[in-house]
Image (spheres, coloured by chain):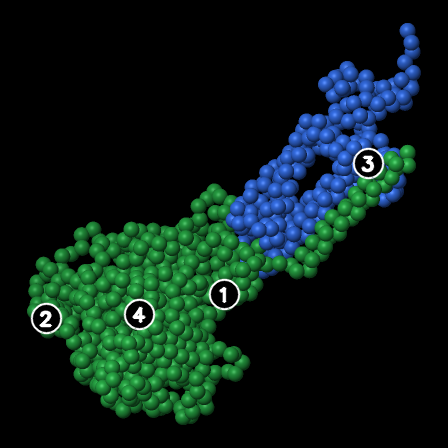
């Protein structure tokens, strides 16, 4: 396990939640008996190592300006808001640009479906909703101006925190905007105070560490959410990721996720599932993060029979389907199953956690946690394959949940084999038993975080927490809580393996095929025409039998003729 | 000076001579085609999933063998028309009942084959019909569907969202079963000569002992002495 990995695992949000469990246990423990060995305490994280240098960042600067020589950055700075002011003296329009982007608004209207998405709207099947929990989840919102201890308000008039994305010292960090339950009061003890001047003078284009601060920790911890995004991508081996590895291309995220006025390409809310535009002309296409935008639409080596056939495969298969052979390959596990219905169990009157899973890098992961329920983890997982045209339909707060489906999709990939714009994509399926309004048949906003009497993380009363969440959102709540089996689909696109590790032909073209459950695929080696095979094999069999009988008779009768003669 | 009679020219005597009836090209064509068809059958049924062989290897060998066979066929078609050998396949069905009767019963009862090979007519009626069926129906069904299948990269884009690929595969598979049946019977039939290996030996050496008319014998002796033994 690298020190960096441990740091990211214990990054702001995880650390806070871990502490809340552990602290709660310590605080409320009433007996003298020591807790069982499996109830382990959280250790303080080691300081982070310096960031990876010289990452390719999608921008070519012949001579990056040495920010330490700028008068405006001499400091001293009281906080990150003061640094932002200094940045704006040169980067005059950056803030205005950022405030239009989803990174700031957390609000996105899908032009294809009209659905209102973004963290301000969606309910997922991890910690379900950022909304009503901004005091915690807002640790990833790039706003300044809320001081620890204040109640959090999603105040869009605050300034943008430049440093969380542009710090290249690795020493900058953000705290959750509010302290939440008193059990969390002691969090971040012992962290070095930030030297804002030093950080401000060492800004640069975002590296994997910067984006990873939030995106590697989605869903509540390192690797939890995506399956193809976790801290192992900070210093990945070439086998894990050809693009991001220092032995490979050393790509920063922004080398593919190009940006224009801070608008970053490649949101999964509205994806390009089949990019026929290819590379475009030099310097163009800053609005896509597709494989084809660099590799073209026909990238396989030619002239070669296999090369042409593989190019043809790309009509119906996403590049990722073959080139990301497995998820969570870097030693960091991802959660595949989560059961909220067991959340709230107490040990000696306090919350606790169990760590029964040890992941590839040696680190233990929670398998039960009073604040969240039961988890199952997985590594080196084969993705689930589905037709996808880039469009996702979300089950939103006001969506009535039908009785037809045994498992409710939180987001459902659209498309199918009859749609030429669809391709087969790999997904991580996340299966969660989530609390829902069994009376009104809707998903719910769960008020998890807060210092008040209703927040689940502290009070462990799911009904109160949901009633509070629904009240804040002015949504009808029947008061009847049930648990609903849900699945969310996370498109897999990172952790691209070297070409020799791509999925082999025989892993699909075989009786036991990776794509066995994908409808509408004719795969030689897998697909059969049962009655044709029956007729054909019967014909061959009968012919062999007829030939055998004819030959046998000939041999027998020839003998007889000779004897007769 | 003896006058040459019509009888002499037409050669009614039909004395038997050992003569090369399958030219070098025909034998090359036959055996390379046989090898390619066996390779194609083996790898083809492996691609279909009936024979365990790594898919990529099977598909690759199948494709290259198919290209080789198409080239061979193209050349052989050319050969057939330039040499006039294509006439060998025109079915003359009058003798068909007798031949069918022979294979159904006569061969078992030790009766002589009702057909005698001649230089002009190397195949009996059943053979012609079988080969014609092979060359006009099964062969084209196989290679046309095969070529379409092989060139999938050219039409993959317009075929996306349709059932074109499985339709092509279906035709190809059906023809593959038919040719398998053909090959089994064909190989068995090679054992029905004077001795079980007689026909095979003929197809290897090219020589068989057949009745020649005087004119044929005279022509061969004068112009193609190498064909006579």
Could you tell me which chain the residue with mark 4 belongs to?
A: A
- Say whether marks 1 and 3 touch (CB < 8 Å): no
* Position of the N terminus of chain B by quadrant: top right
What is the drawing colour of chain B? Answer: blue
Name the mark on residue A364.
Answer: 4
Q: Which chain is green?
A: A
Do discs 2 and 4 share a chain?
Answer: yes
What separation in Å lies between label 1 and label 2 (alpha carbons)?
Answer: 51 Å
> Dot 2 corresponds to which residue?
A77
> Dot 1 corresponds to which residue?
A387
What separation in Å lies between label 4 and label 3 (alpha carbons)?
Answer: 80 Å
Nearer the camera: disc 4 or disc 1: 4
Residue A470 at x, y = what percent?
36, 88
What separation in Å lies between label 1 and label 3 (alpha carbons)?
Answer: 56 Å
Nearer the camera: disc 4 or disc 3: 4
Q: Does dot 2 land on a helix, a strand or a loop? A: loop
Residue A517 visible in this rendered orientation of the protein: yes
Q: Is residue A20 or residue A494 the one in the foreground?
A: A20
Residue A192 at x, y = what percent?
13, 70
Residue B106 at x, y = what percent?
88, 40
Residue A438 at x, y = what percent?
45, 88
Nearer the camera: disc 1 or disc 3: 3
Could you tell me which chain the residue with mark 3 belongs to?
A: B
Is the residue marked by circle 3 packed among few (<14), some (14-19), or many (20+) residues within 10 Å? many
Taking the spot 43% from the left edge, 91% from the top edge, the residue there is A480
> Dot 3 corresponds to which residue?
B124
Taking the spot 24% from the left edge, 74% from the top edge, the residue there is A42
Is the residue marked by circle 2 packed among few (<14), some (14-19), or many (20+) residues within 10 Å? some
């Amino acid at each position: 396990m690298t020190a960096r990995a441990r740091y990211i695992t214990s990054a702001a949000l995880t650390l806070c939640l871990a502490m809340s469990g552990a602290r709660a246990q310590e605080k409320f423990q009433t007996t003298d008996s020591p807790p069982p060995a499996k109830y382990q305490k959280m250790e303080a994280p080691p300081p982070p190592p310096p960031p990876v240098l010289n990452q390719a960042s999608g921008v070519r600067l012949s001579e990056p300006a040495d920010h330490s020589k700028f008068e405006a950055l001499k400091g001293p700075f009281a906080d990150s808001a003061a640094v932002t002011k200094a940045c704006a003296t040169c980067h005059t329009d950056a803030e205005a640009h950022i405030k239009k982007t989803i990174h700031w608004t957390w609000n996105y209207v899908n032009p294809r479906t009209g659905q209102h998405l973004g963290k301000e709207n969606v309910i997922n099947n991890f910690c379900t909703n950022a909304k009503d929990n901004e005091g915690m989840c807002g640790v990833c919102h790039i706003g300044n101006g809320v001081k620890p201890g204040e109640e959090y308000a999603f105040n869009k008039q605050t300034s943008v925190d430049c440093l969380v994305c542009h710090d290249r010292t690795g020493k900058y960090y953000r705290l959750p905007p509010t302290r939440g339950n008193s059990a969390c009061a002691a969090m971040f003890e012992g962290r070095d105070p930030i030297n804002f001047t030093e950080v401000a003078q060492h800004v640069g284009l975002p590296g994997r560490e910067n984006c990873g601060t939030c995106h590697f920790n989605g869903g509540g911890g390192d690797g939890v959410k995506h399956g193809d995004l976790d801290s192992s991508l900070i210093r990945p081996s070439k086998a894990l990721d050809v693009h991001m590895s220092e032995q490979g291309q050393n790509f920063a995220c922004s080398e593919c996720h190009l940006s224009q006025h801070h608008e970053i390409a490649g949101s999964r809310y509205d994806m390009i599932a089949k990019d026929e535009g290819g590379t475009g002309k030099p310097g163009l296409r800053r609005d896509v993060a597709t494989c084809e935008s660099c590799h073209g639409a026909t990238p396989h080596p030619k002239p070669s029979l296999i090369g042409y056939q593989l190019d043809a495969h790309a009509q119906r298969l996403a590049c990722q389907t073959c080139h990301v052979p497995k998820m969570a390959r870097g030693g960091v596990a991802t959660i595949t199953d989560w059961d909220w219905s067991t959340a709230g169990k107490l040990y000696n009157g306090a919350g606790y956690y169990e760590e029964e899973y040890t992941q590839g890098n040696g680190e233990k992961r929670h398998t039960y946690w009073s604040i969240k329920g039961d988890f199952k983890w997985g590594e080196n997982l084969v993705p689930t394959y589905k037709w996808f045209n880039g469009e996702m339909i979300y089950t939103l707060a006001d969506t009535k949940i039908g009785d037809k489906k045994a498992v409710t999709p939180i987001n459902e990939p659209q498309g199918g084999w009859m749609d030429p714009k669809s391709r087969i994509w790999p997904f991580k399926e996340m299966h969660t038993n989530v609390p829902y309004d069994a009376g009104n048949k809707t998903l719910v906003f769960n008020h998890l975080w807060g210092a008040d009497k209703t927040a689940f993380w502290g009070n462990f009363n799911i009904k109160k927490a949901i009633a509070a969440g629904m009240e804040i959102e002015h949504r009808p709540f029947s008061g009847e809580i049930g648990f609903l089996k849900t699945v969310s689909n996370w498109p897999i696109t990172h952790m691209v393996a070297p070409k020799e590790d791509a999925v082999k032909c025989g892993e699909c073209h075989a009786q036991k095929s990776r794509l066995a459950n994908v409808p509408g695929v004719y795969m030689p080696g897998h697909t059969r025409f049962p009655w044709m095979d029956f007729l054909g094999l019967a014909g061959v069999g009968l012919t062999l039998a007829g030939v055998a009988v004819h030959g046998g008779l000939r041999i027998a009768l020839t003998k007889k003729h000779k004897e007769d003669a | 000076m003896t006058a040459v009679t019509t009888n002499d020219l037409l050669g009614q005597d039909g004395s038997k001579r050992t003569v090369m009836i399958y030219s070098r090209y025909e034998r090359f064509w036959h055996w390379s085609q046989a090898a390619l068809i066996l390779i194609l059958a083996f790898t083809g049924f492996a691609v279909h999933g009936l024979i365990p062989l790594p898919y990529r290897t099977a598909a690759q060998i199948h494709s290259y063998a198919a290209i080789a066979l198409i080239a061979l066929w193209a050349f052989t078609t050319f050969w057939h028309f330039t040499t006039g050998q294509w006439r060998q396949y025109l079915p003359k069905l009058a003798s068909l009942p007798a031949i069918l009767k022979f294979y159904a019963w006569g061969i078992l009862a030790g009766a002589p084959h009702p057909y005698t090979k001649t230089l002009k007519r190397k195949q009996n009626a059943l053979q012609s019909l079988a080969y014609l069926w092979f060359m006009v129906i099964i062969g084209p069904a196989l290679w046309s569907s095969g070529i379409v299948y092989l060139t999938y990269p050219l039409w993959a884009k317009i075929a996306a969202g349709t059932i074109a690929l499985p339709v092509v595969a279906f035709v190809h598979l059906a023809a593959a079963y038919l040719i398998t049946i053909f090959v089994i019977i064909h190989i068995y039939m090679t054992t029905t000569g004077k001795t079980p290996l007689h026909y095979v030996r003929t197809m290897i050496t090219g020589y068989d002992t057949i009745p020649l008319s005087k004119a044929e014998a005279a022509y061969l002796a004068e112009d193609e002495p190498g064909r006579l033994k």
